[in-house]
Amino acid sequence: MGDIEITPMVDKKFGAIATGLDLKNLSDEEFGQLHSAFLEHGFLLFPDQHINEDESIEFGRRFGELEFGGAPMANQKKHEDGTFGKIYDLQSQLMRTNVGNEAWHTDSTYKPIASKVAMLSAVVVPEEGGQTELADLRSGYESLDEQTKELISGLSAFHSTNFSQANDLGDFPDTNGEGLYGEVYHGEAYLRPLVKVHPETGKPNLFVGRHAFGIPGLSREESRKLIKSLIDHVVSDDSRVYSHNWTVGDTLLWDNRRALHRARPYDYSKPRYLIGTRVAGDPASELSYFPEDPEAEAGRKALTEELEFLREETKDQMYGATTASF
């Protein structure tokens, strides 16, 4: 293909479209150019790439060790022969989890090592809805007033998907760390700062999302109010938010250390299939602690206490403070 072109998103403080390249056949020089653009812009859109699962894995590995690769992000069960079965019911844990992802978040902050890069590629998309949206945590931080910057400079919050599912949807997945969702709903909570200095750019970013709760040193009410206000601030300016309407063949790559993202609703009775690959963070910058470390006990305690509150507060939410049976 011809020379790579990086075109910044119009009227946005972040993001760019990358054209003139083939993700399946990138030279080291071309990847270096892409990587620099990725760090500069926070996310890149690659139209008309049509990559498959193996190609998604291969490209993702160029950014580092994978957390997972070539995974079907679908509302149907994928069989070994590549075909898809029935569409999952909204009461299933898979769809409860998918619906939960419609709130702003960054990936894997609920694990010991948070993700640094994520990628989605469109295979089957609904006629309406189902967009993926991104929001810029860097310019969100830069636009805060100095008083707020000072307030949050030394604060951290716990991160847990057991919390976010309960808080957002009234969904209470098992916390026994077993089964298909054991890596997601494991009953641990990991402490992460509200302000994250990006390990490659050196620039500070807000680091909040739906998984964040329980700021040590603040009351529950103060913590909830502050986290919500920071997320609301980031997404309050159109120049900090990008909404992508999927076209089959698109690939979207974003920096989890800089950008929030969320899925948007669609007709869940219609098929939707994206290929997902996620790159694990570098332990030097993305490790909180491990479950066996002494620090982990404070997170478990904070999560247990928070879930007790939420069991009473979320009975009127979508899933009525229940646990999926399948």
Image (cartoon, rainbow, N blue to C red):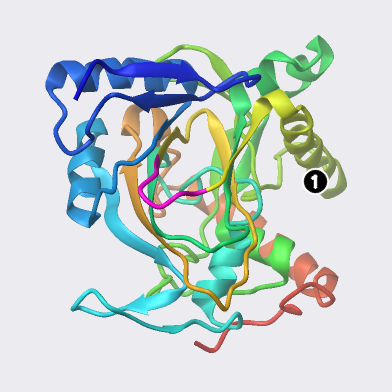
Q: Quadrant of residue 139?
A: top right
Relative height, residue 174 to residue 147 (above, below): below
Give the side of residue 92 with respect to residue 167, left or right.
Answer: left
Relative height, residue 162 to residue 116 (above, below): below
What SS does tag 1 mark? Answer: helix
Give the side of residue 188 with respect to residue 265, left or right.
Answer: left
Q: Quadrant of residue 61?
A: top left
Q: Which residue is mark 1?
A: 224
Front-most of residues 232 and 114? 232
In percent of the image, x 17 and y 53: which residue is there? Answer: 54
Relative height, residue 80 to residue 71 (above, below): below
Residue 109 visible, this orientation:
yes
Q: Is residue 250 magenta?
A: yes
Q: Position of residue 104 (x, y in %)?
A: 64, 46
* Magenta segment boundaries in residue numbering: 246-251
Front-most of residues 318 and 177? 318
User: The residue under label 1 is which amino acid type?
Assistant: Arg
Front-most of residues 135 and 26? 26
Q: Position of residue 221 (x, y in %)?
A: 87, 47
Q: Is residue 67 magenta?
A: no
In percent of the image, x 25 and y 48: which residue is there? Answer: 51
In percent of the image, x 23 and y 74: which residue is there? Answer: 82
Of helix, strand and loop, which mostly describes the magenta segment? loop
Is the N terminus in the top left, top right, bottom left or bottom right quadrant?
A: top left
Q: Position of residue 4 (x, y in %)?
A: 28, 18
Front-most of residues 30 and 116? 30
Number of marks in the rendered image: 1
Residue 174 visible, this orientation:
no
Q: Position of residue 199 (x, y in %)?
A: 41, 19
